[in-house]
Every structure is written in C-alpha cells, then in structure tokens.
Image (cartoon, rainbow, N blue to C red):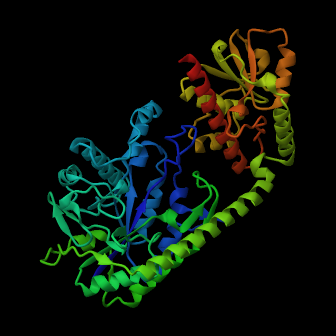
Amino acid sequence: MRVCITIDTEFSIAGAFADPARRPVGAQMVRCEVGGRSQGLGFLLDCFRRHGVQATFFVETAQRYHFNDDPMRALATQIAAAGHEVQLHVHPCWAVFQYPDWPQRVRQQPRQDDLAGRDVASTLALLRHGQATFAEWGLPPPRVFRAGNLQYDDNLFRALAAAGIPYSSNIGLGIYNAGLTSYQLYAGRHRRHGVVECPVLSYRDRGVHLKSVAVSSTSFAEMRALLEQAYAAGMELVVILTHPFEYVQSGDEGFRQLRRHALNQARMRRLCAYLAAHAQRFQACGMAAAASQPLTATSSNNPLLRGRAWRTACRIATQAVYDRYGRWALALDGAIARLRMDQQHGTWRGTVRAWLARIDLGSGRLAAFHLQHPDRVRRVVFVCLGNICRSAYAQRVADRLGMDAVSIGLSTTTGASCPESALRAAQRGGEDLSAHRATDIRDFDIQPGDLLVTMEVRHAQALQQRLIARHDIQIALLGLWCDPPMPHLHDPYTLSDAYFDRCFARLRQAVHGLHRTLERNAT
C-alpha cells in the first residue's frame, strides 16, 4: 500500500484583507525559524531524510501576485533538490493583489479564496499561471494539483483537464464537503472529468463526525490504526495532509513570535519511523508516482474507516493540554520579549520617551496634537528629524494609498538620501526609498490646509512654537493612529534591523489609519 505524506506549502494573508495596514507573511510561514533554526520546512526535510521517506509538497504559486521578490522560488528549489515531489497548489485570494484597488475589491467581495463556484475560464487562468511559474523556476511541469482550502466542484476538474494536469488531491471531506453525491470520496483513486482524484483519507473519529487525516489534528495512535485498517481492507493508497507551519505555535498573525510545536513534531517523527519500519507493507512515495499507477478494480474502493472513541478522547485531551501550555509559554516569551526594549522602542532612551509620551497622552496633555478638523486637511506633511527614515517611509506608504502627501525634516540636509539600513527595511516592508531625497523645513513652503504629522511629542512641540502664528494649519502625532496609540515613534536610524521592521510596521499601520480617517471625512 502506498502512503503519500502531502505538505501544503503556502504563505499567509495574515489579516491584510481585514486591515490593509497588515502585511502578508512570506517565507517565514514555511521556514518557521525559531532561534535561527527552521522548525517548519527544515524540520520536515530532516525528518524525511532520516527515515528515507519521499513526500509531496504542494507549492502555492498565486502568491507571486503579491511577493514580487518571489521568495517561494528558493523554497521550491530546496524541496526539489532534497528529492521530493513538487506539485501545484493555488489559493486564488492572492490574485486580487494584481489590482491597485484590491482593498475595495475585497470589501465588495470578501470571499476571494473560493475555488468552488468559479467558472472554468478563471480557474484555468490560475492553473496556467501556476504552470508558467513552475517553468520559470526550472521545475518539471506539475502533474498533480491541490485546491486551496480543499474546495472542489465539477468546474475545477474540467479546468484541470483543460490544463493537462492528470491527477489531483482536492478532496478532504472532513475539511470541506460540498455535498455533491459524486464527490463523497474517502479514499482510493477516482476518475472525474478525465482527472484521477486521490482524496485525503477521511474517517469517522466519533459517532458520525467526519475527519480528514492531518498531522496537526490526528494522533500517531490514530494514524497507525488507520493505516492498519486500510492495509487490511486492501486499499492501495492513503493520503495524509500537513503544513510546515503546523510544527510551530504562533503568538500573532504576523508569525513573529514562535515556539516549536513539540507535539506535532513528535507525531511526524513517529509516523515516518513507523513507515520505515514496515516498508514491506507501506511504501512512502510521491503523489504523482502513486496516482500514475494503472487503475484496477480495487482503485475505486471507497471505504469509510472508523476510529476508536477512546483514541479520539485521548487525542482531544492531549491537544487541549498542550495548546493551553503553548499559549502560556508564548505569553511568557512575549512578556520577556517586551522587556527587551531595544526591539520595542530601539533603545532605553526610546523606551523612556515612549512611556513618558503615554503618560502625557493618558493625562490629556497631548490633546492639542489630536486631529481636530479633518475637513480642513488639504495636504499631509510627514515630519521627523532627518527625513531619511520615518517620514520618508510614511510618505511612500501614503503615496501608494493615493494621499496628497510630502515629507520634511526638522534638522537635515536637503538632498540627503536614505541610509542603506532604511532602504533594506523599506524593501522588506514592500516599499522603495532609493529615489527619496530629504527636504529641510527651511527649504519647504508650508501651505494653508497642511496637516503636519510628527513622530515624536518634542517634534510636535517644536513645530507648535515655530508656527504659533499660523491658524491655517494643524499639527498631529502620527502614532495616535496606531493600535494601541503610540505617541512616540522612536528614530530607527543606526539601530537594529529588528527595530527598523517594527518601527516601519507601526508607521504603515498609522498611515493606513490616518488615510481611513481622512477618507471617512471626505465621504
């Protein structure tokens, strides 16, 4: 009996559809690095190598509509070089990023990630894009496809046939069940519209509850018992599902705070060791190798296996205890991390200024630096000290949102360029500051209707003193549009990449918040 361990290898929207200020998560969603070691892909490749297991990685390609630097290419190449199958996986939600007005499109049509219910032409276009991506990456053409969210319908299989992809593993009834009679497939191989479908093994774990076999939600004892049942029933193929990110626990959507998921890693190690120890009965192989075998009378066998209630109860109890422990450990790690002030606010000086600014905010002493009259704003002027890091990046984000925005520095040299550290951080944040040149306030014409948005309280106070006679402009603190409000956004210049990224993330969130405020007022 062939056993296919399949790994859906994908990036994450990470809440960007709900809040455009958030950024999708790329390679970290696959590598899952904890303490400089990959606990996701790295762990899997090492585990498979140790036990001589060949697996199938379904690699998502539509993410290229967002990630212009193509970080998945290196991951796919690494997987192929390790001797595993690389096959095609598509989440259609990424395609919306090809449109500049994607936030509006998402608001109008939130279900961007549905493959079920799509017409053949649009699905075929996604498949063609994936095939072209494999060609650009120098990989063999994909022969097996897996749909995002395991969604399926007749049109999907028609599109696969039109694209010339002969095999698929789209169905996992414990995850998604369209209710279509001809697709109630629990195991085996089944031809649909000319495509051979190899569903993820589904079984009843308690009562009538249907469950698909996934490492994150099926104990090793359950997987072992199901393999034994399948072998005894004469089944020719069992498909198991997993993802790289299942081998870590995350404390946030941005995948910044991670810890190793020891429970899931132990399940995978034991599964691979079991397959290796029983190689005379179970052949761990790739999906294309398994699906392409000649179909026989037993290929379409579709038995519904049953688990034991006591195994299910043990798994549920173990997962509940471990998840609670993991949340506690992540909270503890987070508390320790918050004490590392160089990551939160750059330096101890930044930390002190941030807390003093929060005290001033809570006491009401910063009321003058809230936006009082959004209807009077004609232009946004981002202000920091040197106009080469914070205000420069904020202006670039605002430009992308279509805001009328400029940026200046309170003490800088007009024409100065951004430092390399800021250029790299901006690039990591999805922006390009290579063409930016600083402007000193002495070389800048402040106009009626300007909203001068500063990064620090002392900057706002300096502007207030300088422009005390001007009643046709407003001064505000950009960090008040952060969640939670952060009246002090410390200067990242000369500081670590970690703080640069944190600072720029706060700037993105604040600029998006300011944009929403002004947009609501305009509406």
Depth check: give the residue in front, 468 or 45.
468
Depth check: give the residue in front, 492 or 115.
115
Q: Eyeballing the image, is 467 above or below 437?
A: above
Whole-percent x, y for residue 332 in the image: 73, 63
Whole-percent x, y for residue 375 in the image: 63, 14
Query: For this view, does 83 lie left or right of residue 487?
Result: left
Query: For this view, does 455 lie left or right of residue 315?
Result: right
Specify the quadrant that holds the N terminus. bottom left
Q: Eyeballing the image, is 347 above or below 326?
A: above
- State the residue lying farthest toward the front: 207
Please give the name of the residue rendered at 47% of the width and 69% of the height, measured from the top-left corner. Answer: 216
Whole-percent x, y for residue 523 in the image: 53, 18
Q: Quadrant of residue 48?
A: bottom left
Please give the name of the residue rendered at 31% of the width and 63% of the height, measured from the top-left corner. Answer: 173
Query: For this view, does 122 lie left or right of residue 76?
Result: left
Whole-percent x, y for residue 271 in the image: 44, 81
Q: Quadrant of residue 231?
A: bottom left
Query: For this view, does 315 lie left or right of residue 281?
Result: right
Q: Eyeballing the image, is 523 above or below 256?
A: above
